[in-house]
Image (cartoon, rainbow, N blue to C red):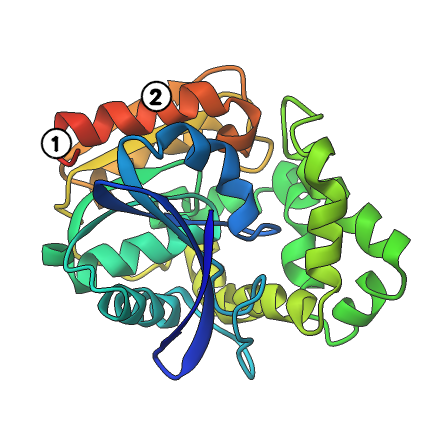
Amino acid sequence: MEHLTVKANGAAFHVTRIGAGKPLLLLHGWPEFWLTWEPVMARLSDHFALIAPDLRGFGDSDKPDGPYAPEQHTDDVLALMDALGIDRAGVVGHDVGGAVMQPLARKAPERIAGLFFFDFVYPGIGPRMAAPDRLNHIWYQSFHQMEMAPKLVGATRESCRLYIGHFLKNWSYRQDAFNDVLDAFTDNFLKAGNLAGGFAHYRAAHAARVRMMKGEAPSLPAITVPTCIRWAEHDPLFPYAWTDRLGETFTDLDLKMFEGVGHFPHREAPDRASDAIRTFFSRIGWI
């Protein structure tokens, strides 16, 4: 693995890369940073040039001054591609990364060879996100917007470890998927600004999510970039039934259930996740 600091869009970004071939960008979610992709990167390095940045606010990248929305991350990603000399890339992501990939594909479709998603928020979920039986699953989205949240979570190493570990374990179906890196994840989020930097996404996304929950999400142009989605069978956040309206957002869609995993397929089943990524990009000629 090669670790770089790349200046782009007025900020310094930590980027990890490995391999050779056509470039694939790997965009992480919350509570994650580049390390979440390490098992996939190790398995795909013979096929692609893999680039896993820490999004602004996360890991060793610079932190935003306030809320930071997917549209702003999009500008970061395009600037990173420019700084790295990448004209066109495949993009893989989930969760926050999946939220970024949608405006990215609308803003610069000519620079995206294909999109590969694991579970993520998209407008078609609509009011289901806030249904009464779902509220216990999304409490953290409100908590993360509270000014005291970073201080409470980061009060001690143990409080941070318990908090981050709660999501990594309970959002997984294979609940030991992060056991070997839990200390590394804890150390990462204890770095100055990293808790608040990750929470900045939820502050920025709040208004749009409220509109979505009210069924008032604005109509956006459909994404025409070739898209593959492997949606987890056992994701407690995003049930598979919520895939029913993906066709309204993506016109060139390959959708299948990813069986036997929860919210983190790339960690819970890295062999199958890597095979699915490689198969899709091979099919569209990006290999």
The residue closer to the viewer here, 136 or 91, is: 91
Q: Write the residue at 87% across / 57% down.
A: 157
Instruction: Of the two numbered discs 2 and 1 on the same chain, state the one appearing first in sequence.
Output: 2
- CA gap between label 2 and label 1 equals 14 Å
The answer to whether residue 215 is seen in the rendering is no
Q: Position of residue 24 (x, y in %)?
A: 28, 45
Q: Residue at x 73, y 41 (%)?
A: 182
- How packed is label 2: few (under 14 Cα within 10 Å), some, or many (20 or more)? few
In-image side of 127 versus 72 (left or right)? right
Q: Position of residue 103 (x, y in %)?
A: 28, 60
Q: Is residue 175 visible?
A: yes
Which element is circle 2 on?
Answer: helix
Residue type at mark 1 is Ile
**Left or right, 35 with reference to 13:** right
Label 2 belongs to which residue? Answer: 275
Residue, disc 1:
284
